[in-house]
Image (spheres, rainbow, N blue to C red):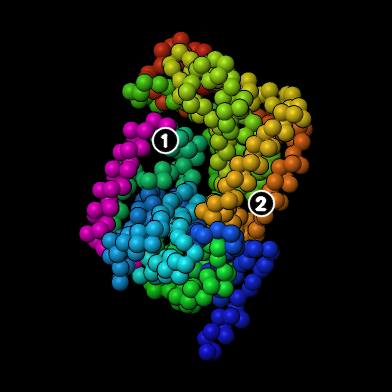
Amino acid sequence: MKKKRSVRRSRRLFKRGAYKKTILSNGLTIITENHPALQSVSMGVWVKAGTRHERPRETGISHFLEHMLFKGTEKRSALDIAVEIDRVGGEFNAFTTREYTCFHLLLLKKDLALGLEILSDILLHSKFDAEEMERERKVILQEISMVDESPEELVHDLYFELLYGKHGLGKPILGTETSVKRLRRGDLMRYFYKHYRPEQLIVSVSGNVSHQAVCKSMKALSKKQWPGRTQALGAATEASVGFGFEPAPSLRDGRWWVKRPTEQVHLVWGIEGPNYVSRDRITAAVLNMYLGGGMSSTLFQEIREKNGLAYTVYSTLSPFLDSGVFSVYAATSMKNAPLCVDLIEECVGKLGRELLTEDELQVVKENLKGTILLSSESSESRMQSIAMNEIFFGEYFEVDEVCRKIDEVQPADIRRLARKFLSKGKRSLLCMGPKPPKSVAAKLRPLFPKKFQK
């Protein structure tokens, strides 16, 4: 009884509407968002560890570890985990990014306790069986080969590597064939115990769910001491405890041509964008939607519809905690690559010179709000949204509040941000394809006067 009262007293609970947040005494954060009309519950464990936290010899270890947590615990085999989820019609998956890792489950509301118990089990009692690790190593090597054979995926990995150099934000999430072959069980165990600790984790749950029920089901994770971990680190900062976080470097500018025997030239054009916590993040989302966020976007209309230069073209915002990239991707023929780059420059530059009309901006705003509102009806989307807001901001944003901020964006805000994007005059261009003829290189030289780097 005393133990229960101690845990209850240690909690700090924040409420806003259907959203609730609890921080346990061991540092674990639990957040929920209740949607009574849904039959589903989506839950995720979010770990503040991704490629940027890996040491040079650990490249790909975050992703390898993600795979291994599906491979059995002290009381469940890998098959047992799969069968328990399949028996109730659920879905269990995970993903790794450059800044965090997530393990997520989608279940019916009646199976909430089962899902949370399985998540607790893999966090506390995974075995990291040596034979399972060798089998999974082969799977990951196949995954790396698949990316090597997918030009669109590969060109983005190479682009980040060129932009960030040896920094963790530039590392391939899957690792390399060399790094994955080098990792040993002891490496995974050390990384696991270092990063998978309560103060580094967020449990996010959305759907037809009671916050009290979630907290009650977190009994195993509420323990002060987790197996294999040293004493809880409390409020110590990442830098002081050596979690591997290093500030992002300035983005490299330049132009690169990577020779690959592809049918098309896959190009990524990019400039520095806002980071995740920037006050310009909403304006940037509107700008991105206008330029390359859909079939009515400027880039899609100019490059595909009007000129027929590419089947696939889009723009992307890639924000991180202390850095950001705004990029445009297109796949085109060799002879049309220079024209594609010209049109990208023209579309982005025009935004810095001219104001959008109120009608143009309104269409984009409604598009972006519609996307957000439609996704808000998914428990999985909401689970991810509240977790990412907690990771980067430490607070909750209601959907209506986000839509209100979108409505506040004005044409002058778009022009100001476009000018800010382009103010430093730096560009980065990566082209991947067969060796370019001199005529193509010459047409690109006015924009990128530096010699192409291999």
The residue singled out by tag 1 in the image is 153
User: Does the magenta-highlighted stretch encompass residue 204?
Assistant: no
Q: In whole angstroms, how far apart are the C-alphas of marks 2 and 1?
A: 31 Å
Q: Which quarter of the figure has residue 292?
A: top right
Asked if 300 appears above or below 208 in the picture, the reply is above
Q: Are marks 2 and 1 in contact (CB under 8 Å)?
A: no
Name above or below for residue 27 compared with residue 142.
below
**Is 438 on the left-hand or right-hand side of 269?**
left
Please identify, in this view, whether the residue under mark 2 or under mark 1 is nearer the observer: 2
Residue at 59% x, 56% y: name it.
386
Q: Secondary structure at mark 1?
A: helix
- Residue where numbered disc 2 is placed: 399
Percent coordinates x, y for residue 194 in the rendering: 43, 64
Q: Disc 2 on helix, strand or loop?
A: helix
What's the amino acid at mark 1? Glu
Image position, residue 365 (x, y; %): 69, 37
Residue found at the far bottom of this picture: 1
Q: Residue at x 45, y 70 (%)?
A: 113
| Residue type at tag 2 | Val
Point out the residue furthest to the top here: 439
151 in magenta: yes
Residue at the spot 70% in from the left edge and 46% down from the top edge: 403
| Residue 357 in view, yes or no | yes
- Magenta segment: 126-152
Q: Position of residue 254 (x, y in %)?
A: 52, 28
Q: Is residue 243 visible?
A: no
* Mark 2 or mark 1, earlier in chain: 1
